[in-house]
Every structure is written in C-alpha cells, then in structure tokens.
Image (cartoon, rainbow, N blue to C red):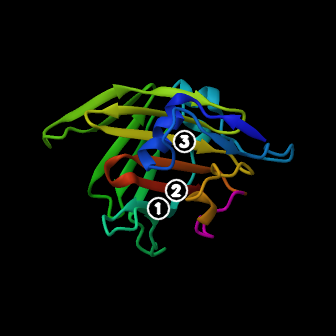
Amino acid sequence: MKKIVTAAFSTLLMGLGLITTSSTIINATVATNNSTSKINFKQIKKGDYTSLLGKWKQVAGMHNAYDGRGITWYKLDPKHPIFKLKITKHQIKEFSGDGRTKFETFHGKYITVKSASGKGYESAKLKWSKNNHFFGASENVGAINYAITFYPKNVPIYDDKYHRKQPKEIDNKKDRIELWCSNMGSVQIFQRN
C-alpha cells in the first residue's frame, strides 16, 4: 500500500540523502489483525511511554563514515552495543553502549540534547507525524536534526534503496524504534525483546 509521507518524515529522508523532493512514496503493509503490539501512539504523543516499557536492544545501525560509500549499515557486536535505550514512563533516553554518555532525551512534546558548546542542554518542541502504520517525531536542535520513529510489530521499516538491504537482525515481527541524527546520518534501530 503506497502512502505519501508527511513533510517531517520527508525531511528525515532528505537528511539521509535518500530523496531530494519534499515528499516521497513508501511501501508499507498493514499490520495484521493478530498483531499484539502494545505501542500506543496516542499515549506516546502525550509523553506517556508506558506502552514502550520493556527491554530494548540495538540490533542495527548506519552512518556516513566519510569513506566514500555514503550512509551504510555497520556491523554490531551483540555483546558490546554501541548505543543503549532507557525508557521510563515519561522519558526515552539514548546512551552510549558503556552507559557513560547521554545523547538525546525525548520527554513529552520535547527533545533535549547536550548543547553544541558542551555546556548545558538545549530543548526543542517535537513535530509529530503519523501514517496508518508508523508514528514519529522530529525537530532541529541547533543545526542538527533529530527524529524518533515507532514501528509496531508486523510493520516494516519504510522501503527504499537503503532499507531493502537491512541487516537480518531487524525483525519486523517485533516492535522497533528508529533514532535518527543528521550528524553523520546516524540511524540506530532498537527492538523490544
């Protein structure tokens, strides 16, 4: 089923270098009636992440290593994740794999990141977008764009030339969260176990 992606999601794809127009078409399948995903988009938009509680693990990631290949998937060591996700009722936080460095925090209608100067934090109000199958938010903080997208069970991550080559570790039968940062075209895919 083809759907037009909203401008906010198009901005995300443009940042990845995957499209150059203000809109794009994606292929997505409708979640089946037997899907048991607990992701509640209405709650998430209000800042209630109860439906996301559980154990999430990074299963894939991609970035531009500036080696002439552009944005590509990188290999993960399952014992030593590069990123971790911590979700509480009111916050989604991304950390380094060793847990020492906090990256972005999503809370309610806002995202908070460390300021470019390295001193303090900056916040911005998120812009939400939804189609029939997945739900996400994005916003610029300073010169960098950040986005978070929620994919319930049985809904594939959007289909384009990069995502057709997805690592086999991405399991469309599980709930997934995709985090995007325009700095190096960084994408992390987390799955709920």
Circle 3: is it few (<14), some (14-19), or many (20+) Cα within 10 Å? many
Question: Horizontal placement of 105 versus 161: left or right?
Answer: left
| 18 falls in the magenta region | no
Question: Horizontal placement of 24 versus 138: left or right?
Answer: right
Find residue 30 and report its horizontal and vertical position in percent: 79, 43
Q: Mark 3: which secondary structure?
A: strand
Q: Mark 3 points at which residue?
A: 149
Are the residues flagged by discs 1 and 2 in contact, CB closer than 8 Å?
yes
Q: Name the residue under label 1.
A: 61
Spatial CA span between label 1 and label 3: 14 Å
Pick the front one: 44 or 9: 9
Are the residues flagged by discs 1 and 3 in contact, CB closer than 8 Å?
no
Are the residues flagged by discs 3 and 2 in contact, CB closer than 8 Å?
no
Circle 1: is it few (<14), some (14-19), or many (20+) Cα within 10 Å? many
- Earlier residue among tags 1 and 2: 1
- Tally of numbered tags: 3
Which portion, as a residue range, is magenta?
A: 166-172
Q: Name the residue under label 2.
A: 189
Name the quadrant containing residue 171: bottom right
Pick the front one: 9 or 37: 9
Q: Which residue is drawn at 13% across and 39% down?
A: 119
Circle 2: is it few (<14), some (14-19), or many (20+) Cα within 10 Å? many
Q: Residue at x 30, y 49 (%)?
A: 102
**Three-letter amino acid code at the position of disc 2:** Ile
Question: Horizontal placement of 175 versus 177: left or right?
Answer: right
- Earlier residue among tags 3 and 2: 3
The C terminus sits in image quarter: bottom right
Find residue 120 and report its horizontal and vertical position in percent: 17, 36
**Three-letter amino acid code at the position of disc 3:** Thr
